[in-house]
Image (spheres, rainbow, N blue to C red):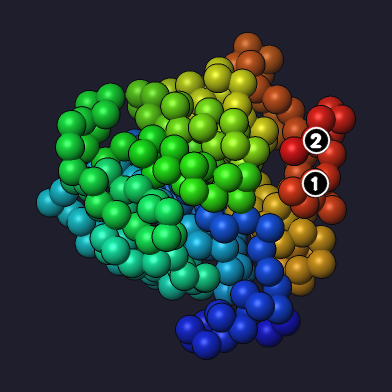
């Protein structure tokens, strides 16, 4: 498939190269920008699964993150808007001062309210609402950050049959968030940042996508004390494939 960049091309790619998942939800905090840049840079232009990123940051710099990520990603990158529907091939950046949730009609919604674990823009509402709406068709990714945001959300995703990826705490600038997620037992894959992009391609589009064939993901080396699982995303990854330990997804 030739790389696609226009809205019409992305819609066509979504029909020709359907995804096993309806959403990739990413949680990041301190140190998250370099990780996000590396992951988005690794995704091909015809990656059609919508991506929503919750990155903790100051509300005074709302537009800075989308502007930076636009420069490195072949995908469409934009600030999320309350009421808009998820579209293929689009990366949505959650606001810094609202919780973002997914509604049953697959539209995004800004939810103002109390701080969750001291955060006005927690990843938990997104992950929990996405799990409720999309069931097993969600991939959650937890990157570097202090504190424990996304810990509750990844458990909701796992409970509904979705996939959870955590950045290897050994390489994370701030390991608290991925470590907290790992300790719940809900994490399926613990990967280095340079492995996460290729893993998303292989999980979302399986072995028949051209981009999946061009990339290979290697197992992360994770210390046993972190309670993490050493797992490799298989070449023939799909929602019904077996994990390396024999479990079913």
Numbered disc 2: secondary structure: loop
Look at the numbered disc 1 and give the secondary structure of its residue. Answer: loop
Mark 2 surroundings: few (<14), some (14-19) or many (≥20) residues within 10 A: few
As drawn, the label of residue 33 is none
Q: Where is residue 53 shown, x and y percent of the image? A: 40, 51
Residue furthest toward the left? 60
Separation of marks 2 and 1 at Cα, in angstroms: 7 Å
Asked whether, in this view, residue 210 is left or right of residue 138, the answer is right
* Residue 107 sits in quarter: bottom left
Q: Is residue 146 left or right of residue 38?
A: left
Q: Nearer the viewer, residue 14 or 55?
A: 14
Q: How many marks?
A: 2
Task: Name the residue at 44% across, 65% down.
Answer: 86
Q: Residue at x 48, y 21 (%)?
A: 180
- Residue 159, picture quadrant: top right
The residue at the point 55 percent across, 37 percent down is 157
Residue 93 in view, yes or no: no
Residue 17 vs residue 214, the one in the foreground: 17
Q: Nearer the viewer, residue 150 or 86?
A: 86
Q: Which residue is nearer to you in this view: 92 or 55?
A: 92
Q: Which residue is mark 2?
A: 248
Question: Which x, y percent locates residue 16?
Answer: 71, 78
Q: Earlier in the sequence, mark 2 or mark 1?
A: 1
Percent position (x, y) of residue 146? 36, 27
**Observer able to see residue 100:** yes
Q: Which residue is mark 1?
A: 240
Would you call the spot at circle 1 few (<14 residues within 10 Å), some (14-19), or many (20 or more)?
few
């Amino acid at each position: 498939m030739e790389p696609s960049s226009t809205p019409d091309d992305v819609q066509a790619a979504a029909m020709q190269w359907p995804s096993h998942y309806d959403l990739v939800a990413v949680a990041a905090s301190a140190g998250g920008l370099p990780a996000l840049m590396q992951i988005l840079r690794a995704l091909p232009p015809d990656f059609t699964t919508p991506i929503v990123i919750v990155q903790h940051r100051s509300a005074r710099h709302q537009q800075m993150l989308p502007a930076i990520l636009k420069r490195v990603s072949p995908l469409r990158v934009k600030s999320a808007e309350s009421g808009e529907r998820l579209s293929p091939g689009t990366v949505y950046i959650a606001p810094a001062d609202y919780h973002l949730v997914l509604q049953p009609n697959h539209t995004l919604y800004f939810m103002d309210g109390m701080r969750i674990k001291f955060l006005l823009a927690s990843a938990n509402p997104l992950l929990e609402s996405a799990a409720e709406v999309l069931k097993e068709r969600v991939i959650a990714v937890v990157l570097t950050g202090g504190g424990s945001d996304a810990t509750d959300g990844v458990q909701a995703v796992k409970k509904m049959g979705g996939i959870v990826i955590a950045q290897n705490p050994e390489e994370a600038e701030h390991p608290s968030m991925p470590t907290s997620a790992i300790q719940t037992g809900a994490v399926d894959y613990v990967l280095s940042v340079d492995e996460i992009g290729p893993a998303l391609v292989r999980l979302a589009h399986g072995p028949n996508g051209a981009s999946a064939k061009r990339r290979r993901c290697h197992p992360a080396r994770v210390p046993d004390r972190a309670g993490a699982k050493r797992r490799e995303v298989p070449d023939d990854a799909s929602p019904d494939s077996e994990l390396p330990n024999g479990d079913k997804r």
